[in-house]
Amino acid sequence: MNTDAVKLLQGRYCNSLTEYSRFVTREVNIGDVPMGGNNPIRIQSMTTTDTMNTIGTVEQSIRMMDAGCEYVRITAPSIKEAQNLAEIKKQLRQRGYTAPLVADIHFTPNAAEVAARIVEKVRVNPGNYADKKKFDQIDYTDLEYQGELERIYKKFAPLVNICKEYGTAMRIGTNHGSLSDRIMSRYGDTPQGMVESAMEFMRMCETLNYYNLVISMKSSNPQVMVQAYRLLVETMVAEGMNYPLHLGVTEAGDGEDGRIKSAVGIGTLLEDGLGDTVRVSLTEEPEAEAPVAIELVKRYNERKTESEKLKAVKNELSAFSLQPSASHSPYEYKKRHTYEANAFIGGHMVPRVVVDLSTKNLKDAAILNDAGYLYSPLLDKYNMAEQSVDFVYLADNLPSFVFPSNLKQLYNYNTWQKLADKTNCHPVFTLAEYIKATDRSSALNLVRVQPADIDSDEFGLLPFDNSLVLVLETTALHGMADQRGFFFKLEELGLEVPVIVRRSYEFEKDHGPSTIDHGQDLELKTQNLQLYSATDLGALLVDGFGDGIWIDAPELPDNVITSTAFGILQATRSRISKTEYISCPSCGRTLFDLMITTQMIRSRTSHLKGLKIGIMGCIVNGPGEMADADYGYVGSGTDKITLYRGKEAVKKNISAANALDELIGIIKDDGNWVEQEIN
């Protein structure tokens, strides 16, 4: 292993918590596209066609490569599919497409051994490669546990030796929902269990002097995924390993949800310099995944260079060259403890959402529709949507209509002073204004600060009197770490003040990490806002930092900003405002059209706030992969569906034509159904 990497980490999971520094991993040869080391972060995706459909798989692979995929993964559920990889590879090469191919293996060592002689890389899941998942709870003695490892070694060693002979790389890909009964029995359904599942196979490979490995820790829950990768890195370093990391949130879903959930998990790790290849798992056509992954990683292509330029002013950031307090662990979720301000924000309250309406025309109450307050002119009243914001920032902009009573208005301090009626109106101060102010709100006072302000004399004069809330802003290139350092410092000082995290995104300016060229459409800007803000804000929320979020994006509609903010809170499990769908991205094993089926299920269940519904194409992505779903809809054969309550199959092999009605019937029987309101 790279000894410099060991020295840098010193028992942590990344090189630095305060500045961007990519963790240097072992270089692994995958055909002629190496991964790890100083190579770029690679982009990949997976085909959805039947692997026996040679032409279809070749054509789809070409579309994926044209979209930017540097590796193409293809499922090989049995020997016949593994053998057909040779014909697929042959036709691709004849057409001039040379991207390395990866065989995806579950349950079938014999298929893996065939594929390893053909393609450049094989992926095995240690949870089911030599283990059958029976959901049995068995208490293993140390001797019995070791006996199981020896049995697995005998089944696994032939594949390793073939990979050595043919120069084939291997990904050891752990999935949160498909840990073996053996691992579950000893470690439970935990990040530690995920890490140990992979480490067992990695140790076997090293025993056989095989090191051409890539490792992944996937979960549909970004919190679990982030914790598992961090723990993996620390564990690898402790054992003298530094294998490349394949990053991905499995079963992320489609559209906005899929992009935001992926960015929370993948982006959090990229921010800390972890990750050598990325796959964004969307329930969409596979060629749609590569552009999203490319956009996610491009922010880091030049960040190392930019970070080095900033070293000249590093002394200004010295306050944040610190470690988190003893109360903070990067391997488990714990919300930062704060006081409750005005019984509205902080403490045990869910994170609040702020939207900026300071530049809007506030003459029509319908302007609040996009903030989740649906105005009826006929009734002259508001109806709250599930995603209703908590604060609107008006700056110096005075509305000509009466706001709903449960929506709090934020004004610049000087304007707030002049308001005749301050009901539900609260001031936003600069730090200097707050220190000098002679009158303040008795309920809520918001003070804007930058991370470096925490060491200023003015900050030391702040009275933390349970009405104070900080609005934390940053313009730093590595803004997430800049803001995270501020939270570490608050913990060090023992300050329990609530904090709203604010980030701003301007897409037209030709500088900074959020650059988008002129002329690009609203859809692309919306996607990039989702990816960037989910990374920047989600990375803090998954660690329990932040009592509210405030996204500024002047070029985008308010409904996009509102939806993105609530999507980030949902993905980080900080605030639930809608149904969550855990849907796999489809592959050659899928037994129905996942995109159509997902939209069909969403159309009838999207109003069931708080429920998690898994939609899986086959049993491989069945009860295990949907890990913490409340209900599951799983392909079990041609035109056949098995329905799950949690991990229990309650209706097996029913007709796909009736499956959704049957699923809704189960939800109703459990008392979890509500009728959809029609406004």
Image (cartoon, rainbow, N blue to C red):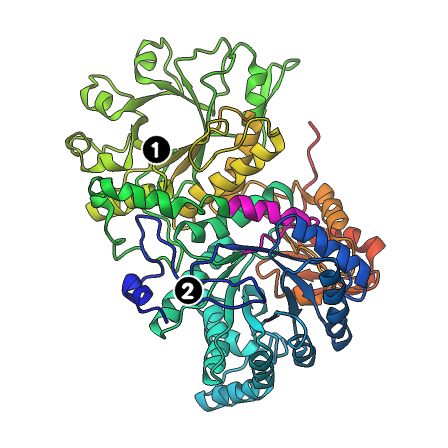
Q: Amino acid at mark 2?
A: Thr
The residues bearing labels 2 and 1 have C-alpha atoms spaced at a distance of 33 Å
Q: Residue at x 54, y 81 (%)?
A: 138
Residue wearing tag 2: 25
Residue wearing tag 1: 473
- Position of residue 324 relative to residue 679, above or below, is below
Residue 295 located within the stretch drawn in magenta? yes
- Mark 2 vs mark 1: give the one in front: 2
Q: Residues within 10 Å of mark 2 (few under 14, many from 20)?
A: many
Residue segment shown in magenta: 278-296
- Position of residue 225 relative to residue 197, above or below, is above
Of pointers 2 and 1, the one earlier in the residue sequence? 2
Give coordinates of residue 383: x percent, y percent: 59, 25
* Viewport quadrant of the N terminus: bottom left
Give coordinates of residue 129: x percent, y percent: 61, 77
Front in this rendered view, residue 7 or 613: 7
Front in this rendered view, residue 287 or 550: 287
Q: Residues within 10 Å of mark 1 (few under 14, many from 20)?
A: some
